[in-house]
């Protein structure tokens, strides 16, 4: 077993994984018995909880942070992508994503950008935090904020409860159905279910909001002076912030070689991500006449990829790029395949029309085709329900970025607008199964798709 050597402010901490302590047997109280327990309170998790509650289920949701929204709110990533097909002609996504946008618009908290492949909606994610609270309250969902999922509890070989820890101590939530919306597949992994953790993971980014950088070519500045400030050869992006003139959201850098499903590596990635933000602000101070002000730091690093739980079907890159139709489709999208390189600086985009573009530092953008031109191209792709079903435990689903997909398809399926839909599908299926007192595998897919459609989703 390996040791981890961490150095923080010259204090060296050695963690020996060989060492153990014996704990007394714990008698854990059951704090809640409910129909459905959702682990993870990102928009994906909240939308799962809402859709289940709207179908009459009793629902609890567990979130380790102080608010809901995940990378959108805590991570400051304030853009959602298009709800239309690849030609911007037909609506292909609605449901709770659209409902949230419409609710935020009433407060001037979202900007629409039509016919833009990079972003369709720029959100004020502070308002989004409050809107997600409203969703939870008005649907009678029991929230557990500042609460960590600790372990699953089995009874007679079946998943019976989720053990959590919070300010009140240790307790268990007993439920009929469990939804793993943790992003990292924590519940599924701790059940011992098989997963894939790839050698090359899309690297995470720590985001910030900064005043005083508008109009600057941040990418150029960083590339020219990065070595002086200890920054890797890298690529990033940025966005305005809805309703706050002069404020820019920055996602300029990555933390490479970090497996954020590992506690030690996650700790170091958080610290390194914040250091990078200070470094590129110092570049601006030294090499321009600006004196930028750090307005917000993400309260957690924006994790792109960790575990992929093995499910009944692994979604492939060609499934998406060829627009494969699935009889159990529960989500639609047209967002390109978007891969942040871990093994070299830059990013790759692949589109449904057969084109491809790659950005590499020192070379800029290159344009090519991944397949020859055709008279017609797919306008959307689908996510099958099977990619959310790990098996073995018939009362468990995964949703969000831990669904089963290869590295290419994950580059598209991981974005929020798509993850949101997987959450809604999980919530609907969970409510149906809880109502019938049966396993997820006993449901008819036509019943799930019909309920999604009746609840406002667009189902093809």
Image (spheres, rainbow, N blue to C red):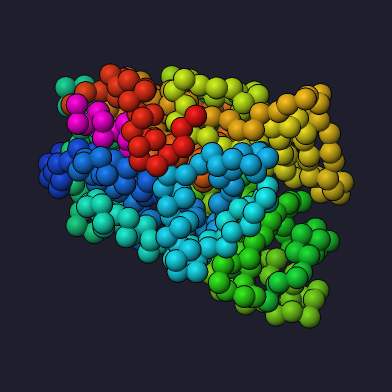
Residue at (52%, 45%) from the top-left corner? Answer: 417
Camera sees residue 15: no
- In the image, 155 versus 178, the foreground residue is 178
Q: Position of residue 49 (x, y in %)?
A: 31, 44
Camera sees residue 216: yes
Judge left or right: residue 86 versus residue 424: right
Residue at (81%, 30%) from the top-left corner? Answer: 369
Judge left or right: residue 138 versus residue 250: left
Q: Would residue 431 be counted in the magenta stretch? A: yes
**Magenta span: helix, strand or loop, mainly?**
helix
- In the image, 150 versus 81, the foreground residue is 81
- State which region is magenta: 427-436
The picture quadrant where one finds residue 77 is bottom right
Above or below for 118 versus 379: below
Above or below for 412 versus 296: above
Q: Position of residue 304 (x, y in %)?
A: 56, 44
- In the image, 335 versus 388, the foreground residue is 335
């Amino acid at each position: 077993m390996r040791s981890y050597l961490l150095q923080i402010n010259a204090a060296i901490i050695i963690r020996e994984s060989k060492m153990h302590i014996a704990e007394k047997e714990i008698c854990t109280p059951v704090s809640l018995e409910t129909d459905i327990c959702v682990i993870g309170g990102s928009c994906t998790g909240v939308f799962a909880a809402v859709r289940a509650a709207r179908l009459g289920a009793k629902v609890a949701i567990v979130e380790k942070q102080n608010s809901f929204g995940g990378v959108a709110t805590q991570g400051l990533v304030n853009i959602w992508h298009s709800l239309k097909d690849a030609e911007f002609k037909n609506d292909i996504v609605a449901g709770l994503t659209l409902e949230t946008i419409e609710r935020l618009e009433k407060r001037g908290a979202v900007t629409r950008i039509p016919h833009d492949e990079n972003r369709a909606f720029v959100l004020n994610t502070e308002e989004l935090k409050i809107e997600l609270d409203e969703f939870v309250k008005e649907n009678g969902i029991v929230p557990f904020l500042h609460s960590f999922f600790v372990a699953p509890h089995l009874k007679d070989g079946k998943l019976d409860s989720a053990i959590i820890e919070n300010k009140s101590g240790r307790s268990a939530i007993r439920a009929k159905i469990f939804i793993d919306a943790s992003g990292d597949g924590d519940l599924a992994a701790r059940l011992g279910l098989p997963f894939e953790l790839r050698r090359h993971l899309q690297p995470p980014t720590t985001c910030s909001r900064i005043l005083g950088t508008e109009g600057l070519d941040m990418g150029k500045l960083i590339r020219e002076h990065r070595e002086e400030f200890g920054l890797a050869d890298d690529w990033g992006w940025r966005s305005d912030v809805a309703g706050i003139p002069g404020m820019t959201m920055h996602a300029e850098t990555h933390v490479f070689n970090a497996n954020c499903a590992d506690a030690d590596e996650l700790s170091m990635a958080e610290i390194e991500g914040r250091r990078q933000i200070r470094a590129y602000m110092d570049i601006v101070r030294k090499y321009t006449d600006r004196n930028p002000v750090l307005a917000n730091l993400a309260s957690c690093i924006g994790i792109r990829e960790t575990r992929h739980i093995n499910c009944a079907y692994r979604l492939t890159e060609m499934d998406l790029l060829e627009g494969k139709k699935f009889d159990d489709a529960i989500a639609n999208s047209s967002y390109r395949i978007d891969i942040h390189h871990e093994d070299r600086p830059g990013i790759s985009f692949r589109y449904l029309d057969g084109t491809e573009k790659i950005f590499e530092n020192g070379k800029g953008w290159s344009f090519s085709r991944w397949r020859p031109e055709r008279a017609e191209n797919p306008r959307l792709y689908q996510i099958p329900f099977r990619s959310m079903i790990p098996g073995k435990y018939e009362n468990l689903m995964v949703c969000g970025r831990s669904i089963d997909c290869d590295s290419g398809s994950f580059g598209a399926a991981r974005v929020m607008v798509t993850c949101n839909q997987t959450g809604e599908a999980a919530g609907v299926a969970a409510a149906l199964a809880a109502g019938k007192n049966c396993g997820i595998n006993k449901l008819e897919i036509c019943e799930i798709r019909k309920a999604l459609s009746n609840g406002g989703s667009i189902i093809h």
